[in-house]
Image (cartoon, helix red, strand yellow):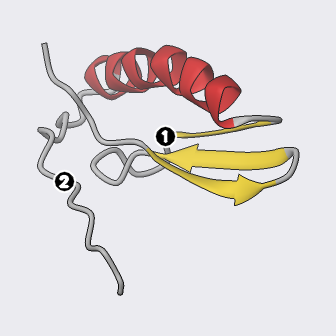
Amino acid sequence: MNAYVVVIEGDGDSFSGYCPDLPGCVAAGDSPDEVMRLMREAIPLHVESLRVHGEPVPPPQSQVEYVEAV
């Protein structure tokens, strides 16, 4: 099983998410939780579509690190 990074952006009641390692795999929703739920559905569907169309499935490569600003 591969674990892909999902980046969530937004504010208020408008959020979106994308997977840097799977271009075109995106979701939008009213909350970060909704976006994550949709991305959990979207990623396997996106990977399956790549396979069906004979395209390579990029391996997860992105990493996340947080830097504290003082």
Q: Which residue is at a point 41% across and 25% down the rendered structure image?
A: 43
Q: Which residue is at a point 33% across and 24% down the rendered structure image?
A: 47
Q: Quadrant of residue 69?
A: bottom left
Residue placed under numbered mark 2 in the picture: 62
The quadrant of the rendering that contains the N terminus is top left
* Mark 1 crowd level (few <14, some 14–19, many ≥20, 10 Å Cα): some
Sequence-wise, the earlier of marks 1 and 2 is: 1
SS for dot 2 = loop
Identity, as a three-letter code, of the amino acid under mark 2: Ser
Q: Quadrant of residue 4?
A: top left
Relative image position of residue 10 (x, y in whole percent): 71, 57
Q: Is residue 44 left or right of residue 57?
A: right
SS for dot 1 = loop
Front residue (pair 41, 14): 14
Camera-near label (1 vs 2) is 2
Numbered mark located on residue 25 in the image: 1
The quadrant of the rendering that contains the C terminus is bottom left
